[in-house]
Image: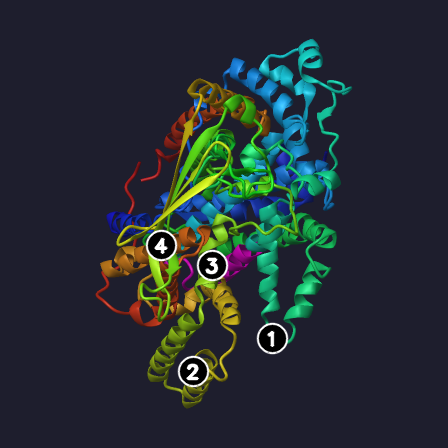
Amino acid sequence: MGLHSTQYKGLMGWIDARMPSLMIAYRNHMSEYYAPKNFNFWYFFGSFALMVLVIQIFSGIFLAMRYKPDSSLAFWSVEFIMREVSGGWFIRYMHSTGASFFFIVVYLHMFRGLLYGSYRKPRELVWLVGCAIFLALMAESFFGYLLPWGQMSFWGAQVIINLFDSLPWIGNTLSTWIRGDYVIGDATLNRFFSLHVIAVPLALLGLVVAHIFALHDVGSNNPDGVEIKDQVGPDGRPLDGIPFHPYYTVHDLYGMGFFFLLYCAVLFFAPELGGVFLEGNNFIPADPFQTPQHIAPLWYFTPYYSILRATTAEFVSWIGLCVTFLGVLIYLSVRSRWVQLAVAAGTVVLFTLMTIPQVRLDPKLWGVVLMATSTTVFFLLPWLDQSPVKSMRYRPRWHMALVGLFVVAFLVLGCMGMMPPTPGRTLVSQLCGAYYFGFFFLMPWWSRMGTFRPVPARVTFAAH
Amino acid sequence: MIHFIRPLAAGALVLGCLGVGAQEAQLDKWPADRANDLAALQSGARVFVNYCLNCHSASLMRWNRLHEIGLDDKQIKTYLILGDQRVVDTMTVSMNSHDAKAWFGKPPPDLSVIVRARNTVEHAGTDYIYTLLRGFYRDRSTLTGWNNVVYPNIAMPNIFWERQGPRIATLTRVEYQQVPPPDGKGEPRQRLVQTVSQFDGSGIAALTRTELDHGEPSFAYGFKPVDERAAASVDDEVANLVAYLNWMSEPTAATRRKIGVWAMAFLVLFVGVGRWLNAAFWRDIH
């Protein structure tokens, strides 16, 4: 046993002498990672997201033991798990409830970033990696939703894969390549299974590690948007920072209790959540010859789906006008001649392709473009937000109202996407969609406006 | 937070105003108190075996799972299994899908999870099936001689017709239609038209059409049974059948809820301990 580290006693010392990186990692990320002491409610959702990831991987491992990725068996194997495998219903509901909770938690986690400017310098990379996680999560959920091979699985995938069809020139080849067949079939199911259980989870895990590393390098933001590293004590530690372990581990453990109360309430008492988490149509085996009356994606995709569906030829013309307005605004705001020229050219091209009847592109294609933009626009936030302070606490009150309206627009879009379209609903979706894009693309201007309150040097904190 | 909640409420209001148009049949409420009533479930199982399990299968349902609603192997074998199946087999039928397609136009769906399959955000699957099975009326214009208020032109005939006795159905539909101009010249007009169709017990329809000046598209129906008592007893049987179908769609539901109560109790305790632990650690943070 001879070799022993001087820093730790017993087994820890033995390990530390042989693998110091383990304890270094523990210190860097847990015991000597200094997090601001004023975290509030919104700061729970990061660790909740990690928890759901663990739940999904754990339950997924067990589901894969009984699931059959074969188009003639898939539907029945899922019901077999529900009925004949002991405890199978529990594992399956863990996974299906977990999928929806993943998105709830991640949306709230992202909202926190919006509220306190967590994406601002120096945390741009944390945010970008986070946006990549969000995209990976959407891919993961899309692939996974085909696996139960119900009517909604099949037709939902049909709608999404057909979107690629609308791309010019390569669309048709691309969608066939994704399906592995001319129609969604066994080949599609098999590759989606492989992507769902290996490829995307692997990417997700890597991205999550990168997300946490990037965060711990620059340190966490906080509800005041104050950089705690600017105020350090004689020992070099931030005055407002406390070690993540044990303070935030016990804090998150406590919060986890509430999370599990909600999660288990759904899991045990309403796993379908009235047809929102598990759709009725998905209890009917996939039938390529019978299109359901109303196809809607799962709730967490419906805001973007609404935007896609609301993109009519008329709406594209309006967007063309908005793009022109935005182009003029950018032109007047930048100084470089070259940038001005590029902006002018870009605006003219976009306006032409959206509005001029003889040359404009298919509205369906613009729908796909707008939908793709609505899911990826988050990447731009660190540069769109030009406010002199990070946190909403010290920004003008009407900034908060704009953010609140954005949340409303997002939720309304979500509800519209779940319901069959009517002219009235399409109009509401268009208005909300316009607000959605306006909120982001006009942010460089509105986020500077108004009177900002002075940001304190230290965080505001009242002892518990 | 207030800034945040107010716009949310406004959004909810907007959504409320865009409610679904009432052009579909109003569903009757299935008496949900039968969901865990063993007598109702057992009687429903008998109705299921006698009336449904000739054309529809329930291929995910094992006979001996009926233990969970209080039936033993002997009862299952004697009273329920009509063919030569064993209690460990699943509820399959001999009708093949090729014949079914020839006879009914499409194969009858498997009923194992049918209640869950009919769940939507707007209505419960139980209410849908309860209304569907009691919503048949005689209609000479269809292939089977039957039609349905919630599922127009359904391929399935009314299985309870003998027991239920004849019923007079009145369907009132208000919808926009193209109406020829009054003087016979010019373009047809879009008008709101109310069509009342009365189907007598033998399926002969009497139609009356009225143009309405105001109102909105809607659909309503009513039944007048010749034998009130017979119709009521069929209603009761259908309610039991739906209870059984509901149970069969998720036989583990009762266990799930039972375990759920324990899980929630544990979590409340967990939150209590978590709260104490959190307070104990955070005491020295000022």
* Residue drawn where x is 28% and y is 48% of the image: B9
Is residue A124 a member of the stretch shown in magenta?
yes
Do the residues under discs 1 and 3 have CB atoms within 8 angstroms?
Answer: no
Tell me where the magenta segment starts and ends, as one range. A115-136
Q: Which residue is mark 2?
A: A347
Q: Nearer the viewer, mark 4 or mark 1?
A: 1
Q: Which residue is mark 4?
A: A407
Marks 4/3 same chain: yes
Is residue A114 a member of the stretch shown in magenta?
no
- Write down the chain letter for disc 3: A
Position above or below: B145 against A370: above
Q: CA distance from mark 2 to mark 1?
A: 21 Å
Left or right: residue A184 versus residue A50 is: right
Magenta: main secondary structure:
helix
Query: Where residue B150 sits: x, y (%)?
Result: 48, 39
Which amino acid type is marked by label 3? Tyr
Query: Where residue A444 sits: x, y (%)?
Result: 35, 71
**Which circle's residue, 4 or 1, is located before the other in the chain?**
1
